[in-house]
Structures are given as C-alpha cells and as structure tokens.
Image: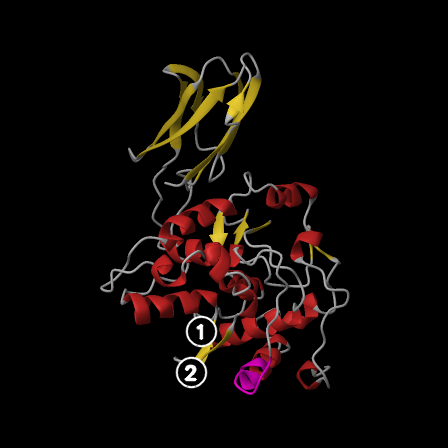
C-alpha cells in the first residue's frame, strides 16, 4: 500500500498545522460484482489512527461510502518536536503505516 | 454518407485543447494539486519500482538509466514509435515491457497492472510540460495511415467514428459530458469513473464500449496505431501525466 503524507517539517510551538494523507486503496464497497457475477467482498480501510508523540490526535472509522484512494486532512496543534505515526488497517487485515517528523522552532 | 477516410489531408483540431480544459473546476483543482491528485500514488509507486532489481539480470531500471528525472525527460512525448529492435510499433507501456524482457530478463508486466501503470506514469511524469512531439517517418507512416483510417471509420451499433465526436463536435454536450478533442497527453490518467489509474488503451476501449463496438484486446495493433494517430493530432500539447479525468 502506497501512501503519501504532507505536513510542515517545521512549526512554531502552538501553531496550527495542516496534516494531509492519501492512501492507495481500492475501498471495495461490497456492493459490486465481478465479470462472472460473483460478489466482490467488502474491503475498506476501516480504521486510520494518527499518533503524535504517542498520543492519538486523529482517528477515522471509514465505511463503504468512502471513495477509492481516500484522502484525509486534519488540523492539529504543534506542541513538541517528534513523530507523527499513521497506522491503518483494512477489512482484509492488511496493515499500513507511515511516519513523518516535525521540528519545533522557537 | 460522407466518406471521411478519404479526406485529402488529416485534420488537427484548432485550437488544440487538452482534455483538462473541458473538465470541471473540481477536476482541474484535483489535477493541479500534486498532493491531492490520486495519480501521484502511482508515480510514487513508480519511484520505488524504478530502483528495484528485477529478473535474472538482477538489474533495476536505475542501473542502466540512472536518474529518471534526467534520462527520461521528454521520452514519453515521442511515443508511440517503432522500436528498432522489435521492428514494431510500441507505446510507452510496450517499451517498458520490452526493456524488462530484453535487458532485465524479467517477465513482462500484465496490461493495466498497477506495476506497469506505476512505471509508465513515473516515466511519463518526467516529461511533464514537454510538448507531445511524435515524428512521422518512413517507418511509422503505414501505421499512421492505418490509425488515421481507423479514426475515421464508423464502428459499432452506434455507427460512429472517432472523428464524429472528437473532430466535429468537441466542446459540445453529450448528455452530461462535454466532448473533448480526444487527446492522450495526460495518460496514464486517474479517472474518477474507474476510481483508479488507467492507460490510454483502456480509455479508447471505453469509447468502443460506448459505441457498442467490439473492443480490441489490450496491446492490439489497431489500438497502437490509433494511439499513434491520436498522439500526432495532439502534437504540441504539454504532457500532463498523471492527469485526472471524470
């Protein structure tokens, strides 16, 4: 699973920062059928959590209404230098993870 | 019935307009933002594949071609072209697969596989902004003429040729859609309808489907020849890969 994360590398303490992530995933709804008429089982990223220095700052529980290759965006407050850890899991049990670092200046 | 196939000189639409100019504001924004553009996921995958060793040779693309940003700049703008080694017309996907077979000694990627689309998108991405510049010569002239004839031949239950929509009626509405000039300068493209990235051949096949005509299989000679003609008539348009279309 390919994922792209975009957020500022540096921020001032207390600054509101924008974090964006896009994950390559088919997000199968479970309502579609293949060419032979068999139902394609539902397979969506059902849980995405973002931890900032260990504490959860964002959690998304997704269902079958989310388009393929979901793109999520949220705001948080930069408090300390450290890591953002993005972790997600889909219905097939496949896990993915990304990491991005931020440095606090001043 | 007007016999388009024997028109004196092949016509290019004027002014040339990329498909993105017919797209809605939302789609244009999506393509313009390199982060939100879902096609960039395939490019990102292509970055990895570029330096991954493959096949019996144990070589990666980078082992021979080095930095793609330098070695692949402008390459996509010249395809489809006749490959001197294979002595047949190939598009960019076909050329990548030829390289895999010949130099990496690896099995070719399947048509429309994520890997093939990713590498193609990555290579074409290096030519972003470079104008399409397919050159007609003695080698591809016959292919070009066949592609042109096919472009102007009525097919399917709808009994329409490509030219009926994309030469004569571009810019007009077909139900909810504005008919484009039918250029391939943004492919491989992320199509919202597909919810994935696809090749120009997939798009052309979708047109055949809409015409209720028999769809040529992926990699078919007639599709390649049509791709060549379509590329030629879009000569001068900047490459947009990875594009976003509805």
Number of marks in the rendered image: 2
Residue A92 location, x and y as percent? 30, 36
Q: Is residue B137 magenta?
A: yes
Seen at 49% across and 55% down, the residue is B69
Looking at the rendering, which quadrant does residue B235 occupy? bottom right
Disc 1 is placed on an element classified as loop
Q: Earlier in the sequence, mark 2 or mark 1?
A: 2
- Which of label 2 and label 1 is nearer to you? 2
Which residue is at the far front? A106
Pointer 1 residue: B220
Residue B211 location, x and y as percent? 58, 66
Residue span colored magenta: B136-144
Disc 2 is placed on an element classified as loop
Give neighbour class at mark 2: few <14, some 14-19, many 20+ (Cα, 10 Å). Answer: few
Asked if labels 2 and 1 share a chain, the reply is: yes
Q: CA distance from mark 2 to mark 1?
A: 15 Å
Q: Is residue B166 magenta?
A: no
Pointer 2 residue: B87
């Amino acid at each position: 699973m390919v994922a792209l994360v975009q957020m500022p590398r540096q921020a001032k303490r207390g600054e509101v920062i924008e974090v964006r992530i896009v994950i390559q995933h088919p997000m199968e709804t479970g309502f579609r059928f293949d060419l032979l008429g068999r139902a394609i089982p539902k397979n969506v990223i059902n849980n995405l959590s973002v931890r900032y220095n260990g504490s959860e700052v964002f959690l998304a529980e997704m269902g079958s209404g989310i388009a393929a290759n979901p793109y999520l965006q949220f705001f948080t407050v930069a408090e300390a230098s450290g890591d953002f850890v993005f972790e997600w899991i889909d219905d097939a049990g496949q896990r993915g993870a990304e990491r991005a670092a931020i440095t606090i200046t001043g | 019935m007007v016999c388009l196939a024997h028109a004196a000189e092949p016509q290019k639409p004027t002014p040339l307009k990329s498909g993105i100019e017919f797209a809605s504001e939302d789609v244009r924004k999506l393509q313009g933002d390199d982060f939100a553009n879902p096609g960039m996921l395939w490019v990102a995958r292509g970055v990895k594949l570029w330096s991954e060793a493959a096949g019996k040779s144990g070589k990666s693309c980078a082992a021979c071609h080095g930095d793609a940003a330098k070695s692949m700049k402008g390459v996509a703008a010249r395809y489809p072209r006749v490959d001197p080694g294979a002595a047949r017309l190939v598009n960019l996907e076909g050329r990548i697969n030829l390289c895999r077979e010949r130099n990496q000694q690896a099995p070719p990627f399947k048509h429309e596989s994520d890997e093939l689309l990713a590498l193609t998108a990555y290579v074409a991405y290096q030519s972003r902004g470079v104008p399409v510049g397919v050159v007609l010569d003695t080698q591809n002239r016959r292919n070009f003429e066949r592609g042109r004839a096919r472009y102007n031949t009525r097919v399917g239950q709808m009994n329409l040729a490509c030219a009926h929509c994309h030469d004569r009626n571009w810019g007009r509405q077909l139900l909810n859609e504005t008919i484009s000039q039918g250029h391939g300068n943004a492919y491989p493209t992320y199509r919202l309808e597909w919810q994935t990235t696809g090749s120009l051949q997939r798009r052309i096949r979708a047109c055949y489907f809409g015409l209720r005509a028999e769809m040529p299989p992926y990699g078919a000679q007639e599709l390649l020849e049509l791709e060549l003609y379509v590329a030629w008539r879009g000569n001068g348009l900047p490459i947009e890969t990875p594009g976003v279309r509805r």
